[in-house]
Amino acid sequence: MGTLANGVRGLLAHPDQLARVTGGEVEWTAAIEEILRRYTSVSLLPAVFSTCDTEVAGVPVPEGEMLLLAYGAAALDPGAWQDPGAFDVGRDARGHLAFGHGPHLCLGAPLARLELAVALPRLFERFPALALDAEREAAGAASPVESWMMHHPKQLWVRPRGVAAGPHARP
């Protein structure tokens, strides 16, 4: 569910990109790959240990050294992506590492893509005026979960665009 929350938040934070998808300029499948690239919910792999003395980017790594691989950072590599910090639903984002790679590819990747492909279009079809709740965002309601590995908001507060929080809105 973290990736779904990240996707909704990313699209609502970039209404121009949301309009490209909901308007049919860009396919949902392409938008989903960009969501996975830019807003992946798993940012660190579990710790691994070096099996021999080696070197990574000029830094010696002795045998037995614990390593944390921040593969979410690959989404921000300017050598791999043009303007990597930008959220662009029209980019060819295939090749991202949101689900790992090769023999370590996440077995749940097809299910996660299916969940996003079903939920996102339906959400924005049903609620076309959805917007982030700016008051709660400013108050820190979108603070991330406290985790070394995961990256997604604890809560995602939205409301219809142009509608203020009512007297019965929960904090």
Image (tube, helix red, strand yellow):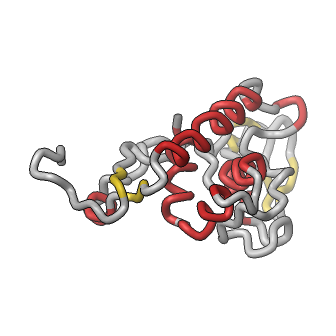
* Residue 30 percent across, percent down from the top left: 77, 52
**Count of labels shown?**
0
Question: For residue 136, what is the image quadrant?
Answer: bottom left
Residue 82 to residue 45: above or below? below
Q: Nearer the viewer, residue 132 or 5?
A: 132
Q: Residue at x 64, y 38 (%)?
A: 116
Residue 107 to residue 98: above or below? above
* Residue 57 percent across, percent down from the top left: 83, 63
User: On the rendered structure, is 106 left or right of 171?
Assistant: right
* Residue 109 percent across, percent down from the top left: 74, 31
* Residue 93 percent across, percent down from the top left: 80, 56
Q: Residue at x 82, y 31 (%)?
A: 104
Q: Residue at x 63, y 56 (%)?
A: 22
Question: For residue 78, what is the image quadrant?
Answer: bottom right
User: On the rendered structure, is 153 left or right of 88?
Assistant: left
- Whether residue 151 is visible here, answered yes or no, is no
Q: Nearer the viewer, residue 36 or 129?
A: 129
Q: Residue at x 79, y 61 (%)?
A: 59
- Whether residue 125 is visible here, answered yes or no, is yes
Question: For residue 160, what is the image quadrant?
Answer: bottom left
User: On the rendered structure, is 166 left or right of 54?
Assistant: left
User: What is the residue that sits farthest to the left in this orientation?
Assistant: 167
User: On the rendered structure, is 129 left or right of 140?
Assistant: right
